[in-house]
Amino acid sequence: MPVATRAQQAPQAAVGGVAQLGPASPPPRPHQRAAEPALHQPPADASGSVCPLAALGVDLFYEVLSHLGDAETLQAAERVSRGWRAAIADGRLWRPLCEAAWAACVYSPAAARPDLTWRQRHALTLADRQRATLTADELCTFTWLFRFKSEAGRFWLALDPWWVGLPQLRRFFHADGSLTAAPEDPLWAALAGEHETRWRFCKTRHGVKGLYVKVNHWPSLTVSRTPAGGWQLENEWVVYAAALQPGGPYARGLLPGVASHQE
């Protein structure tokens, strides 16, 4: 049987007067760093997904959505959660959409509705563009540009300055049912004293008023909207177009009845 060496039989050296009962831990390496605390992680939902609103913060969340800023995207985002809906509802994202829509059209009643939210004003802007019924206030407030169509015949075209490159004639509908023109109107002067010009709304066979306007005994004028949100009246002989301009008072929110015959 081999004899243990003196080194093997000797007890382990004492450190600080206390015997070591096990092997000593190796000293830390000079380049080894202490473990860093874990970064804060945004809360996840039950599926483990992290909400972008919590991950990005409100400001960056708005920045991302502003680059996708169409109404359909915002409406879809509102349906994600209550938090998203509340964040979008403050108007920071809806206001640019409203202002862009108003800049592109000539008539914006919603621009004069600060009592509504920006989302409601945007919805009202889109709904008004689809409206085809003209109100008496609108008819009697706007200045209307008048011209004959080629179908009216040579006699009437010779009296219309628009056909020789001059500005269109102006017509004014009034709440008392009368229709007038500017004093310098050559066509009106040629017909002065021959008849009184009156207007009235015609109802459809379904009882809808505001789709047709009749002047005297002439064919009824059909009401329609222009691509820019303006108004037009026409029959087979004549055209009346509301004198509305982009950036004009009615595009900025002036409501009919507040001031008449603005351009």
Image (spheres, grey):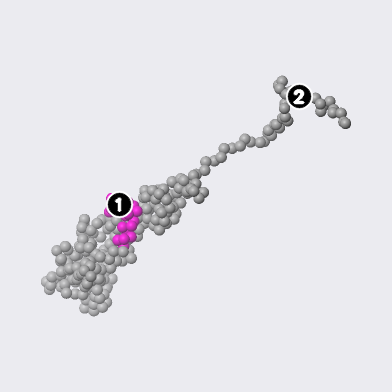
**Residue 194 got which mark?**
none
| In the depicted structure, whether residue 54 falls above or below residue 188 | above
Tag 2 or tag 1, which sits nearer the N-term?
A: 2
Residue drawn at the location 63% of the way across and 36% of the way down: 33
The quadrant in which residue 29 appears is top right
> Where is residue 190 drawn, in percent x and y?
16, 73
**Type of amino acid at the residue the image marks with label 2:** Ala
Residue drawn at the location 46% of the way across and 46% of the way down: 54
Q: Which residues are magenta?
A: 111-129
**Type of amino acid at the residue the image marks with label 1:** Leu
> Where is residue 61 drawn, in percent x and y?
45, 49
Q: Label 1 crowding class (10 Å Cα cut-off): few <14, some 14-19, many 20+?
A: few
**Residue 13 got which mark?**
2
**Residue 116 got which mark?**
1
> Where is residue 133 drawn, in percent x and y?
25, 65
Using the rendered image of the protein, determine whether residue 189 is visible from the camera's viewpoint.
no
| Residue mark closest to the camera, 1 vs 2 | 2
SS at mark 2 in the image:
loop
Along the viewing direction, whichever of 209 and 227 lies nearer the viewer: 209
Using the rendered image of the protein, determine whether residue 211 is visible from the camera's viewpoint.
yes
Give the side of residue 158 with respect to residue 51, left or right. Answer: left
Residue drawn at the location 29% of the way across and 66% of the way down: 225
User: Quick one: which residue is furthest to the right in this view?
Assistant: 1
User: Quick one: which residue is furthest to the left in this view?
Assistant: 193
The quadrant in which residue 24 appears is top right
SS at mark 1 in the image:
loop
Mark 1 to mark 2 CA distance (whole Å):
87 Å
| Number of marks in the rendered image | 2
| In the depicted structure, whether residue 222 falls above or below residue 1 | below
Residue drawn at the location 17% of the way across and 68% of the way down: 199
> Where is residue 2 drawn, in percent x and y?
87, 31
Q: Main SS of the magenta segment?
A: helix
